[in-house]
Image (cartoon, grey):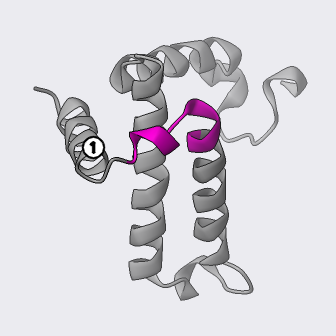
Amino acid sequence: MSDTQEITQALLEFRDERDWAQFHNPKDLALALNIEAGELLESFLWKSSEQANEDEIREELADVFAYAFLLADSYGLDVKQIVLEKIKKNALKYPVDKAKGSAKKYTEL
């Protein structure tokens, strides 16, 4: 079992023990993911990156990952596969010779 499968399985077991699957439809998982991402951002509000509380970041980032993994599972998506596919797509949009050291969007390269 891969790490991503192990994480997903642990999340599903946690959810199912509490009978929360009824609340975990894709729309609500996407909303929860966005809310948790907002809470992650809040850790940085009015601070430099160095001033942000690492414990808060760890907690909120774990929530972001958890909802992302559950959302992927609800569509039968393999997290590793979709991330690696996206990296390949981005490599085509952002070739090293044009994108290295640049923060420009691919349409501006």
Query: Residue at left 58%, top 17%?
Result: 91
Could you say where residue 33 lies in the image, as x and y percent from the top left?
Answer: 58, 49
Residue in the image at 81% along x and 32% along y: 105
Q: Quadrant of residue 58?
A: bottom left
Please, is residue 28 above or below residue 36 in the view? above
Q: Amino acid at mark 1?
A: Asp
Given the current orientation, which residue lies at the most extreme left position? 1
Name the residue: 10% across, 26% down: 1
Q: Relative to 105, is 37 on the left or the right?
A: left
Percent position of residue 45, x then y: 71, 80
Task: Give the magenta part as a residue range.
Answer: 20-29
Left or right of residue 62: residue 4: left
- Tell me if residue 62 is in the magenta stretch: no
Q: Secondary structure at mark 1?
A: helix
Q: Nearer the viewer, residue 17 or 51?
A: 17
For the residue pair 10 and 99, the one nearer the viewer reads as 10
- Going by the image, does 95 lie left or right of 13? right
On screen, residue 56 above or below 26: below
In-front residue for pair 20/102:
20
Tally of numbered discs: 1
Q: Main secondary structure of the magenta part?
A: helix
Picture coordinates of residue 81, whole percent (x, y): 38, 16
Q: Which residue is mark 1?
A: 16
Quarter occupied by the C terminus: top right
Rendered view: 30 above or below 35? above
How crowded pointer 1 is (Cα within 10 Å; few <14, some 14-19, many 20+) is rated as: few
**Residue found farthest to the right:** 108
Residue pictured at 69% horizontal, 29% vertical:
99
Q: Quadrant of residue 51?
A: bottom right
Q: Nearer the viewer, residue 92 or 31?
A: 31
Tell me residue 26's x, y (percent): 57, 31
